[in-house]
Image (cartoon, grey):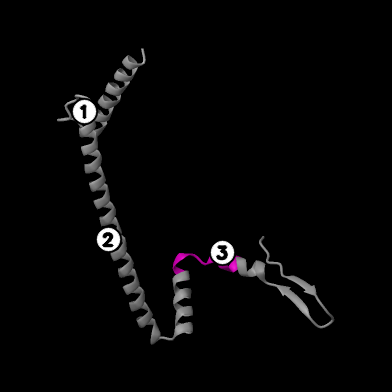
């Protein structure tokens, strides 16, 4: 059997300190998902008033929209930088391959890197002997 204990402590002759934290914690544990939404709505109405709530919701919606626009713009810029960077790196790989006498046509970047490494490795081992 579960019982709730109140912790009482007499601080002076006329005062009693009642520790309600365990009781409050147990009550809060029983409140799950949807109830919190209602609690937040009620607290919002009490704090801001019923006339101010739609105005706050509109400003929150605008802020969310601005955030989404900024996020999408940042993603577009990042994609653009990646595309520019991959073109530049491909051009560098092709230039290196041509100087080493490797035909870059029909090969992806990884295959081209492997051939360049093989060519550099074989020329480096020949030069060191």
The span from disc 1 to disc 3 (Cα, nearest Å) is 70 Å
Within 10 Å of disc 3 (Cα), the crowding (few <14, some 14-19, many 20+) is few
Question: Which callout, 1 or 3, points at the residue further toward the start of the chain?
Answer: 3
Q: Is residue 62 above or below residue 30?
A: below
- Residue 89 is left or right of residue 38, and the answer is left
Q: Is residue 29 magenta?
A: yes
The secondary element bearing badge 1 is classed as helix
Badge number at residue 73: 2
User: Is the residue under label 1 in contact with that under label 2 (CB below 8 Å)?
Assistant: no
Residue 17 x, y percent position in the rendering: 75, 76
Badge number at residue 6: none
Q: Of residues 87 and 70, which is closer to you in this image? A: 87
Q: Of residues 27 and 80, which is closer to you in this image? A: 80
Question: Which callout, 3 or 2, points at the residue further toward the start of the chain?
Answer: 3
Q: Is residue 38 magenta?
A: no
The span from disc 2 to disc 1 (Cα, nearest Å) is 39 Å
Q: Which residue is mark 3?
A: 29
Number of the front mark, 3 or 2: 2
Badge number at residue 99: 1
The span from disc 3 to disc 2 (Cα, nearest Å) is 42 Å
User: Is the residue under label 2 in contact with that under label 3 (CB below 8 Å)?
Assistant: no
Q: Which residues are magenta?
A: 26-35
Q: Is residue 7 above or below residue 103?
A: below
- Residue 30 is left or right of residue 79, and the answer is right
The answer to which image quadrant residue 70 occupies is bottom left
Residue 55 x, y percent position in the rendering: 35, 82
Number of the front mark, 1 or 3: 1
The answer to which image quadrant residue 129 occupies is top left
Magenta stretch secondary structure, dominant: helix
Q: Is residue 7 above or below residue 54?
A: above
């Amino acid at each position: 059997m579960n019982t709730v204990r109140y912790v009482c402590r007499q601080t002076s002759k006329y005062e009693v300190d009642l520790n309600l934290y365990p009781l409050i914690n147990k009550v809060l544990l029983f409140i799950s998902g949807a109830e919190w939404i209602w609690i937040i709505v009620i607290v919002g109405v009490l704090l801001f008033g019923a006339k101010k709530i739609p105005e706050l919701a509109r400003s929150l919606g605008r802020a969310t929209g601005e955030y989404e626009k900024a996020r999408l713009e940042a993603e577009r810029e990042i994609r653009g930088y990646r595309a520019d960077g991959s073109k530049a790196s491909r051009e560098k790989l092709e230039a290196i391959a041509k100087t080493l006498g490797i035909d870059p046509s029909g090969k992806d970047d990884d295959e081209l890197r492997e051939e360049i490494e093989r060519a550099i490795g074989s020329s480096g081992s020949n030069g060191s002997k």
